[in-house]
Image: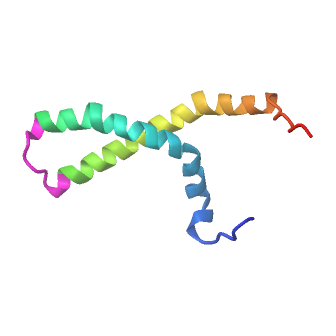
Amino acid sequence: MTLPITGDCCDPTLRSLGQYSYGIYVFHRLYIVFIGEPLLRTRYGETALSLGPQIAYFLAVSAASLATAVVSYHLLERPFLRLKRLFVPATAPG
């Protein structure tokens, strides 16, 4: 069954982001836990951040995650995805 999809989800930019979505998912948390939070704690302590640093933090983590995801996709995922053609699914007996 195929659903008719129209609108923004058919935009080529959004579709190309879909290729990198797994990498973004994996890497964003690593940037937050191992780099972002320690740096923020060192710089600001436990005080709440104002809106400016929050936006800068969000943009920096987003950009770093996207860049890492793009590199990861082209260097790791894509070569492994090419291997799919070498494996033929077994047919069910009967």
Return the residue found at the far front: 94
Judge by depth and name the residue closer to the eye, 94 or 86: 94
Residue 64 can be seen in this image: no
Q: How is the image coloured?
A: rainbow
Picture quarter containing residue 74? Answer: top right
Give the residue at x 8% y 39%. Answer: 45
What x and y, as percent, mark residue 32?
30, 39
What x and y, as percent, mark residue 62?
37, 46
Residue 65 can be seen in this image: yes
Whether residue 45 appears in magenta in the rendering, the answer is yes
Picture quarter containing residue 39? Answer: top left
Does 7 sit above or below residue 11? Answer: below
Magenta stretch bounds = 43-52
Q: Quadrant of the N terminus?
A: bottom right
Give the residue at x 52% y 46%. Answer: 21
* Magenta stretch prevailing secondary structure: loop
Give the residue at x 35% y 34%. Answer: 30
Whether residue 1 appears in magenta in the rendering, the answer is no
Does 81 sit above or below residue 11? Answer: above
What x and y, as percent, mark residue 66?
45, 42
Return the residue found at the far right: 94
Q: Quadrant of the C terminus?
A: top right
Give the residue at x 59% y 45%. Answer: 19
Does 5 sit above or below residue 89? Answer: below
What x and y, as percent, mark residue 34?
28, 31
